[in-house]
Each structure stands twice: as C-alpha cells, then as structure tokens.
Image (cartoon, rainbow, N blue to C red):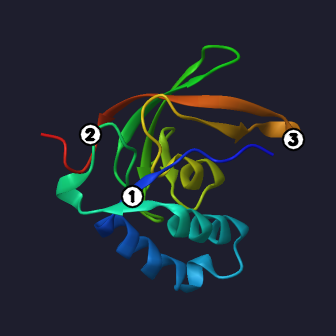
Amino acid sequence: MSTPPPIIISSQDAARLEQLLESPAAEGSAVAQALETELVRAEIRKPEDMPADVVGLDSRVLCVEEDSGAEHRLRLVYPGLAEPGPGDVSVLAPVGAALLGLSVGQSIVWPLPGGRTTRIRVAQVLSGPDAG
C-alpha cells in the first residue's frame, strides 16, 4: 500500500467538512470515515494562503487517466449542490474525497465499474473559490 500524497485544505473547507461529518448525511459512511482521516493528515491553511493549484470545494479540475490519457473535467462540490449532468462530484463520493487537497501533478487511484481501478492525475485546477 502506497503512502497517500500530501494534501492542503483551507481552514474554511475544513470547517465546512467537519460540520458535514457530524451530520446525518455522513453517518456510517465509509467515505465519510476516509474523509475524516484525510482532514486529520492535511495541512490546514487560511483561505488567502491556499496555492492556486490545489483542489478545494467548488474547484473545477482537469484530471487525466494515466493509463489511457482520457480527460475528465470535474467540479468538487458539497453534497446536495451537484448540478444535473456529468462533471459534478460530491466530496462524499470516493473520488471526491480522494481529490480534495491534491495539487496539480499528484495522482490517486480511481475506482472503475467492475472492481477495476485506474490512476488519475490532477492536470490543472481550472477554477476555484478564490480564482480571480
């Protein structure tokens, strides 16, 4: 088992996520437990000190499957705020929890249908809550 990459989370996102983890929506969820572990190991920074290349809540990111080169444009959202159609990923979904706090160039294992996995790399943070 490989060591997870270092992650950075804004204090604002961390506070919102801690509230979420205490809500009934997260109760008993394996993803919520994983997210809690991520929060514990994350470097927490003030929003104004967040690098522009880090995935946070409401970030739009371009991810690339390392095996196939397939590109995915995703927006990491708070549960219940996903817009209809592809692209919005809840932070309580496995890939959403895994993307949170990653920087451009870092990669994660993404589960695929049928129990397979692929490695997906954050290629670009297209926009975020603090993007100008």
Kindly indicate whether the residue at mark 1 contacts the one at mark 2 (C-beta within 8 angstroms).
no
Badge 2 crowding class, 10 Å Cα cut-off, few under 14, some 14 to 19, many 20 or more, is many
Q: Is residue 96 above or below residue 22?
A: above
SS category of the residue bearing label 3: helix
Q: Is residue 44 left or right of residue 121?
A: left
What's the residue type where badge 2 is placed? Ala
Pointer 1 residue: 9
For residue 33, what is the image quadrant?
Answer: bottom right
* Residue 52, numbered label: 2
Q: Position of residue 63 (x, y in %)?
A: 51, 28
Instruction: State the separation of the CA atoms marked 3 and 2.
Output: 33 Å
Q: Residue at x 48, y 65 (%)?
A: 79
What's the residue type where badge 3 is placed? Gly
Badge 3 crowding class, 10 Å Cα cut-off, few under 14, some 14 to 19, many 20 or more, is few
Q: Which residue extends farthest top?
A: 69
For residue 124, what is the image quadrant?
Answer: top left
Dot 2 or dot 1: first in sequence order is 1
Q: Is residue 78 left or right of residue 91?
A: left
Kindly indicate whether the residue at mark 1 contacts the one at mark 3 (C-beta within 8 angstroms).
no
